[in-house]
Image: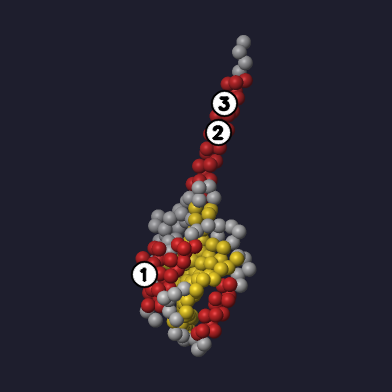
Amino acid sequence: MKSKAPLVLGILSGVLVLGGIITALVVYLDVNSDGGSNKRADKLPAACGTVSEAALAKARTTNPNGLGSRETKLSNGTHTTCAWNQTKGVDGSGQRSTTLFVVQGQKDAEAEFDRIVGQNMANTQSTPRQKPLEGLGDQATAVLAETDSAFTELSVVVRKGDTIVEVDISGWDAGLFTNTKPDPAELEAAAKVIAEDMTAKL
């Protein structure tokens, strides 16, 4: 009588292989799932409308976030915050968020520019790197903040006259089976386009 051991082992091996394939597929689909939410009709402050749809598409954040946006009138000028997230079915997988800060009417805008850049460089949760930028406003710099994880943030800070514009883009990309760091050059290019849209109107 023949032993059934080879058959049993074959079945077990097949089950294990199939289980591994299913697990890998589930992990892949989870990592590469659409990172967005359904398109919202949130109303943002008027200044936020200066940013073009093309610039938001480049940043992969076309969904307006009203909860993260506000405009405040202060004695030393106006502070505006504009926020966008990903739109489901439009901006792809991974994760991206964009926040734009506009500070107008600064009496000492150069000092405020230095303060904001210094604040970005003081990020203790990452290893920030600063790079001066040419052709944007009167002063401009980019600060890249990378962490031990895939999460990456890049800020472009611009001063034009008495106005400071700061664009923060953060997130990660979807890899094969895990999240990966986004290309800093891609983040910088997207942030610069948004900053250019805003400073062109100042």
Residue closest to the eye, 131 or 54:
131
Residue drawn at (39%, 63%), measured in percent from left and top? Answer: 57
How crowded pointer 1 is (Cα within 10 Å; few <14, some 14-19, many 20+) is rated as: some
Name which residue type carries label 2. Answer: Val
**Can the viewer see residue 38 in this picture?**
no
Q: Which residue is mark 1?
A: 52
Instruction: Point out residue 52 in the picture as x, y percentages from the top left corner.
Output: 36, 69
Q: CA distance from mark 2 to mark 3?
A: 10 Å
Residue appearing at x 56%, y 72% in the figure: 120
> Residue at coordinates 59% horizontally, 61% vertically from top-left?
147
The residue labelled by disc 2 is 17
Q: Secondary structure at mark 1?
A: loop
Q: Earlier in the sequence, mark 1 or mark 2?
A: 2
| Closer to us: 143 or 31 | 143
Relative to 64, residue 27 above or below: above
> Which residue is painted at 58% across and 33% down in the image?
16
From the viewer's perspective, is 13 left or right of 173? right
| Picture mark count | 3
